Amino acid sequence: MSSILPLLNIVFPVMAVIGVGFFYGRWKKIEPRVLAELVLFLLAPAVVFDALARQQIHWEELAKTGVISILIHIIPAAVALAVKRAAGLTQRPFVPSVMLMNSVSLPYPLALLAFGEEGLAYVVLLSIPNIFISFTLGIMAYGGGASVKEPLKMPALYAAVAGIVIALAAIPVPKFILRFSHLTGRGMFPVELFTLGYRLRSIRASDFKISLSVAALRFGLGFVLAWALSEAFALTGASRAALFLMSCSPPAVLNYIFAERYCEEGSLAASIVFTGTALSLITIPLLLLYLGVS
């Protein structure tokens, strides 16, 4: 029981903010697209820069974790695409929701709580390719050919490049800039979760079959890949744990943000994200137990 309480301290606030957004939507009406724009163009770049600029990164570790991170994104996407075509599905969020996992708001605090600063450092390294994949392939998957140039308009890409350069070169950053990025970036999580909860009002019961299918692929493929890659790269300790925490994360809230902005399938994406996040209340304790956390 004592090992579950720290987990609840992390997961419960996430679900509570989603609930606030849901019930607020029954009281007042807002335009969720405005909040989606706020996340994409201000809050996400701030949290990306803040997370990277505070790290000390070495080229060798960056290259190794980069390859691993790309594999845990691309392989599930390829499998999901094959499943989508075989099943004759037309829903656009299906493939990217399997590809894009929650790379920050769950694995970051979980790694820090369970494995300390070393675990957090490895998760941050693994999340770097996620930034580029989310704002390139992720946007293209939701917007089709019309959004090929859209990633170049995303400030998060440039924030990631700046953060990596600063971390690799150990460039000192003025404290007032880091405080600004930290303060602004912290707003991303409640805003995106609130927006998700607000959009859940329009979830259709027919969406849950797709949502459960995506969750099964996300968690199942994530675990298998984490095990296979940890064996192939001989990962141990905190690096192995970080890989499992990242690879087995539920679909990212950005899936909803992108769906709301680019393809008008926000209600389905919201259902997918909510279902995956809810199921993580079961999968995360099991994963921590597998990793030997007590």
Image: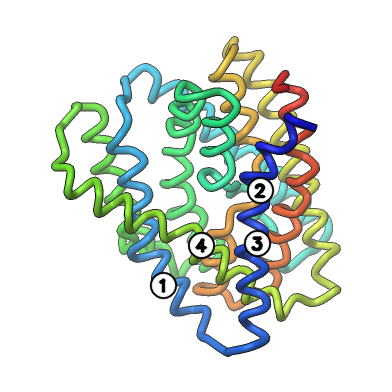
Q: Is residue 93 left or right of residue 59?
A: right
Labels 1 & 2 near each other (Cβ < 8 A): no
Residue 18 image offset from top left, x and y in percent: 64, 65
Real-space CA distance between mark 2 and mark 3, rounded to the nearest whole angstrom: 9 Å
Real-space CA distance between mark 1 and mark 4, rounded to the nearest whole angstrom: 14 Å
- First of labels 4, 2 by sequence position: 2
Labels 1 & 4 near each other (Cβ < 8 A): no
The residue to which callout 3 is attached is: 16
Q: Nearer the viewer, residue 100 or 142?
A: 100
Q: Residues within 10 Å of mark 2 (few under 14, many from 20)?
A: many
The residue to which callout 1 is attached is: 37
Residue at x-position 70% and y-position 53%: 277
- First of labels 3, 4 by sequence position: 3
- First of labels 1, 4 by sequence position: 1
Above/below status of 44 relative to 202: above
The residue to which callout 4 is attached is: 190
Labels 3 & 4 near each other (Cβ < 8 A): no
Residue 212 image offset from top left, x and y in percent: 82, 56
Real-space CA distance between mark 1 and mark 2, rounded to the nearest whole angstrom: 25 Å
Q: In this view of the protein, can residue 96 be seen by the observer?
A: no
Real-space CA distance between mark 3 and mark 4, rounded to the nearest whole angstrom: 10 Å
